[in-house]
Amino acid sequence: MKIRNSFIVFVCLSFCGISISKAGQFINLGFEDANYSGDPRGPDYGLVSDLLPGWRLFYGTNEQFGVGLNVFIDSGYYATIFNRYWGAPEGQYAFKAATPEGGPSWKLEQQGDVPEGAKMLAYRGNLWTVAVNGNVIPLLITGPNVYNLTNVVFYDISAWSGKSVTLDFISPNTSPDPFSKGGFGQIDSIAFIVPEPLFVENDFNGDGFPDVGFEHQDGFVGVWFMSMGPDIDFFELLQSKRC
């Protein structure tokens, strides 16, 4: 997984003790599976099935079957994977797409199963529109913004946890830069985030609540209860037994 350690503290602001995992049927979420044997400096072109395995690529509503490698065109109309020679943020490859101002957006699409218990979808890049089965999902929070590239972006995926879905990433077609003549989208390190169950000390019956009502500081004497009524009844019981 290509989410760096520097982001873990940021994620933990929302969840305690998370694990990050990829969906079983989703592949190439980090764009690392490109099948390319040419000059790594490029520029070059290849089939989507080779350079973006697992993904379908659309420009507007038109499916594209070719994609670039380190291809950046001044006209502002391109879709390409790019590598360390052109500043890929993590790993070997990332994906970038550009479109003229107000023009059609690029769309990356893949079908797969959202992991059971997944709460968030995260990636590194700038703000894309993310849709599941054609429904735009809510943006939760973004990381620090550097040169219009947000470090990590989080979306709410909880409604589709454990379900088979069509996942779309739709590139922006405008730019926050007033001097730009088009929009661009950069994306990498897509991941599903599944919170781990919180550990509850002294939960003997697995109901999520501690079962020890009293424990001596030496740890050898204690009083606990399970499947009883309200706490007030238990503490009244303790008071009635005091010497």
Image: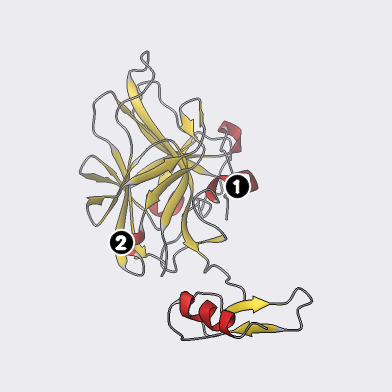
Amino acid type for the residue under numbered disc 2: Ala
In the picture as drawn, the residue positioned furthest to the front comes out as 243
| Figure check: 122 above or below 112 | above
Q: Is residue 12 left or right of residue 131?
A: right
Residue drawn at 48 percent across, 76 percent down: 231
Instruction: Identify the secondary structure beneath mark 1.
Output: helix
Mark 1 — residue? 9
Q: In this view, does 137 lie to the left or right of 95?
A: left
Res 53 seen here: no
In the picture as drawn, the residue positioned furthest to the right comes out as 218
Percent position of residue 44, x then y: 47, 37
Percent position of residue 206, x then y: 51, 81
Q: In this view, does 18 lie to the left or right of 130?
A: right
Percent position of residue 37, x then y: 56, 49
The answer to whether mark 1 and mark 2 are in CB contact below 8 A is no
- Residue density around tag 1, few if under 14, some if 14–19, many if 20 or more, within 10 Å: few
Mark 2 — residue? 159
| Figure check: 148 above or below 126 | above
Percent position of residue 97, x then y: 38, 35
Quadrant housing residue 85: top right
Which labelled disc corresponds to residue 220?
Answer: none
Instruction: Identify the secondary structure beneath mark 2.
Output: helix
| Figure check: 8 above or below 182 | below
Mark 1 to mark 2 CA distance (whole Å): 25 Å
Number of numbered callouts drawn: 2
Residue drawn at 45 percent across, 50 percent down: 122
